[in-house]
Image (cartoon, rainbow, N blue to C red):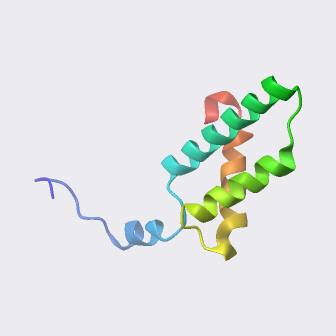
Amino acid sequence: MYEGAERPGPQAAEDLDKGLSPYLIRELANWYLSKFEEERMAAGTVQEEALNASLRALLADRGVFPEFVEVEFERVMKVVCAPLGKR
């Protein structure tokens, strides 16, 4: 540990158990937006159900337990739908 750095307290340990990190949420949101735009440019339309299913599968691949996939999906979609300055 770096000199002068504080040790994480109990709250920090609890936060680690609350799901995906904000960084990973943003990374997945950027992936979703990229795929959305890629499909829109190629086909002129987007199959949102298929894209949503792909995101859910990606969450499962990242180790999200099945019972929490929907929770994490909603967290990612909040970032996807956020105004540009709020991402």
Name the image quarter holding the N terminus: bottom left
Residues 10 and 59: in front is: 59
Q: Going by the image, does 59 lie left or right of 3?
A: right
Residue 57 at what x, y percent from top left? 68, 60
Give the residue furthest to the left. Answer: 3
Q: Is residue 67 above or below residue 20?
A: below
Query: Horizontal and vertical percent for residue 26?
Result: 57, 43
Horizontally, residue 12 falls left or right of residue 82, namely left
Q: Residue furthest front?
A: 42
Locate the C terminus and report the quarter of the image it occupies. top right
Tell me: residue 66, above or below residue 76: below
Residue sitting nearer the eye, 12 or 29:
29
Looking at this view, is 41 or 87 the one in front? 41
Q: Is residue 71 above or below residue 10?
A: above
Which image quadrant for residue 9?
Answer: bottom left
Residue drawn at 63 percent across, 28 percent down: 85
Count of all numbered marks drawn on residues in the image: 0
Q: Residue at x 52, y 50 (%)?
A: 24
- Residue 86 in the image: state x and y as whole percent: 63, 35
| Image-based side of 52 in relation to 65, left or right | right
For image coordinates 14% across by 53% down, the residue present is: 2
| Residue 75, horizontal then vertical, whole percent | 67, 55
Quadrant in which residue 14 is drawn:
bottom left
